[in-house]
Image: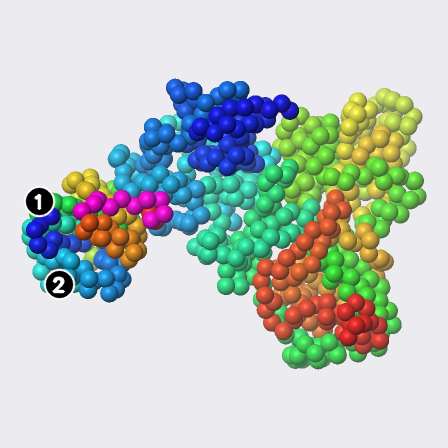
Amino acid sequence: MGKNKPKVATACMCGCSGCHMSFLDVDEFVKDLAELVEFQSSHVIMDIKDIGKVDIGILEGTITNDENVEVAKKMRENCDILVAWGDCACFGGIMTMRNFGQIDNILEECYVEKGDEDSVVPDDDLIPTLTKKAKSVDEVIKVDAYIPGCPPSAEIIRYGLEKLLEGEIPKLDKDKLRY
Amino acid sequence: MSDVKFNVDGKDISARKGMTVMEACEENDIDIPKLCQHEALENLMACRLCVVEVNGKQITPSCGLKVNEGLDIKTQTEKLRKYRRMILELIYRCENHYCMFCESDGDCELQDLMYEYEIDRFEYPRMFPDWDVDSSHNHIVKDTNRCVRCGRCIRACDEVVGNQTLNLGGRGITNEVIVDSGVPLGESTCTSCGMCMQVCPTGSLSNKHSLFKGNKDECELTKSTCLSCSIGCCTDVYTRTGHLVKIEGTDIDKESGGQLCERGRFKPLVDRGKRISNVIYRENGEESELSLQEGLEKAASILGNSNEISAFASGGLTCEILDAFSKAMRAHGALFDVVGAKRYRFETEVKRRINMIEGHFINDITEVMKAENILLYDTSIYNTHPVLASYIRRAASKGTKLITIDAYEDRFWNHSDKSITIESPKTQLTRLVNQVIKEGKASIEDLSRVSSILGGLRVHPEDVMEIVNLLEEASYDIIVIGCEIIDRWSLRHIFELAKLEGSYVISLNKASNQYIRSLETEGVYEEPEVAYILAGEDEENEDMIKLVENAEFSIVQSSKKSELTDKADLVIPSLSTFERNGTTIDINGKKKEVELAMEPKGEMRSEIAFFEELADKRGIRWGKTNQR
């Protein structure tokens, strides 16, 4: 870790931001945390979206499109320790439900069959392309620490961060593990 | 049995010969993980999670390994943990086991094991097979996406319920639990007992009516007794914030295997009849609401001014309530009867007339599983006493000969060796059987002659001979008589047959509480001035409805709106089954506790106090009231 305050970046991929909400539930620990670490980027507490060089990189959500892959790779390149927050990042989560069917059929069903007469499947260069399958983070990049839970409770998130600050890789034992 | 000494994880333990290593470890509080093993079922060795190291080399499932002198067992080595983690992950990767959107989240044995083995990531890619969810059944959802192929449901359906509805179909990755020969569950031979659901370790088979109403930890648990029939199964009643969530069977170690039936497990969850919370009084087509006290005064004055009162109670009430009701009604000079008591009175009368000793009557219904032959009169026990029906099916599956005699469809058609369809009364058939046994073997020609003398009967001589031959060969046969048989002659002939052949008898009646055997009852006036009905859960009983229709004035006490309460002149609220405390007597004569699972809703707090006060209006006091 860095010589001064360790730097932290968090990002949410295809997820509900529930893990980040749960992170905010650590309440006054945020104050302590602000003194212990420096947040480089985090979409729930600051405006900076661009991931820079950090010691700890935290990812929430499933990888389901090109942009998610880019964010995950960028985070991996820029951080020393990469943490997966929540069931989506660790296992794939609810988004992998789409893997039970074919992506074209699902898009067709969502946008055309359930829409009105004029509905079409969106097709624009600005919209990230969906990956063939929804994936957990470690199917795309190497993950160092896993904090599953849907969402992981504030205590578990705090436990994970405290372990990291002590220089250890957190591993949830059977009493802490809850999906 | 002799003891075997061996070593588990460095600890010397002893076990009885013939036990498995898993059973011995369980007795000694040594934890071995398992998914397919269930104490009510035979071991299958399907999941392989219970693997142990034997003598430092072999790895084998402990549920299939018999104890042996000097074995050295290790249950928790790093190697075993690695294998178990691998098995768990492979189970997970085959289907969709995400906890977050599963009804069994928090009540799941797979989830518990995943926590125990600290699985926070996957090593293997997942498969995402596309399984359909089968929700065709009225009460059970079958979701293969959550299935671990442990085979518990299949074994429960076969070994406990004796119904063989569930099977394994397909091979390799297409392997799944199928229903009959691959039909939807709702169109199958399923008896809807819900046993498969109760033993399912995951959310693969779940209760439609309890879905997402809370897992067991979030519910309050009350241990009680089912009042749906006289078998009196022990139940676990789960409630949350005063509402019923689910009901499960508990007698896992007994013959019943912890099964319940459709009525015991599902009916209370489905029954959403409108609750009766006020006294309703109807006069000249006008309906008015009264307070409970006013209702009591009204009932007392009507009863007090009448000379012909018929009081009729449900057989599914506790002993205490039946007692209080009968005393209150007798205080007003009423004739008193309970559902099912009529059959019992006939039975007693016939027994006395033919000097039949009590030794012919079986005190333990599980005995049917030991019989060589079962002669079943009236197959409606399939609906009225489903757990006894399961014992009969189990016996028939294991080789007991089953002959059924019914006026309608044989509900045991796929288990009975012979189905005889003969309209009621069944007297003629039984009478011929008796005659043949008494007078020595007769030929079919002789029988045809006899039957023609008896008036051109619908009895086939072949049927008679078959029953005769069967009963004469076997040394232990049981005659089961269903509740629909209520004519004295049929009963008499069946009892005489039992006496003649030394057969044992299980005689059933419609009362769930067999307290009726010691309670004094008599027939009631069919067209009384006043009928007082305590409906309990018998609101669909035809005798009750008839009585209400025939009475000049009718009082119905019930917990929910029904045809009965619609026709009554005075409706008084009562408690529901789960709001009562008390005792019941089961078919074996055993006293069982009925526990209060929910606080009473509405004005009625205690029916006993209500009846005490009703009797007090005629100056008759008993129990606590005396000490007032």
Tell me which residue sits at (10%, 55%) in the image: A5
Relative placement, left or right, of A99 versus B365 is left
Residue B537: assigned label: none
The answer to which quarter of the image holds residue B457 is: top right
Q: Is residue B493 visible?
A: no
Q: Is residue A43 placed above or below B276 in the rendered structure?
A: above
Mark sitting earlier along the chain (2/1): 2
Between B559 and B568, the residue placed more toward the observer is B559
Model colouring = rainbow
Tell me which residue sits at (58%, 55%) in the image: B222
The residue that mark 1 highlights is A77
Q: Amino acid at mark 2?
A: Met
The answer to which quarter of the image holds residue B416 is: top right
Which residue range is magenta in the image? A167-176
Q: Position of residue B507 (x, y in %)?
A: 78, 42
Tell me which residue sits at (40%, 49%) in the image: B105
Q: Amino acid at mark 1?
A: Glu
Magenta: main secondary structure: loop
Q: Secondary structure at mark 2?
A: loop
Between A32 and B315, the residue placed more toward the observer is A32
Tell me which residue sits at (85%, 29%) in the image: B501
Relative placement, left or right, of B154 versus A122 is right
Chain of the residue on which disc 1 is drawn: A
The residue that mark 2 highlights is A46
Q: Position of residue A175 (x, y in %)?
A: 36, 47
Q: Position of residue B40 (x, y in %)?
A: 57, 36
Q: Is residue B337 visible?
A: yes
Q: CA distance from mark 2 to mark 1?
A: 21 Å
Q: Is residue B483 placed above or below B360 in the rendered structure?
A: below
Residue A66, magenta (yes or no): no
Residue A172, magenta (yes or no): yes
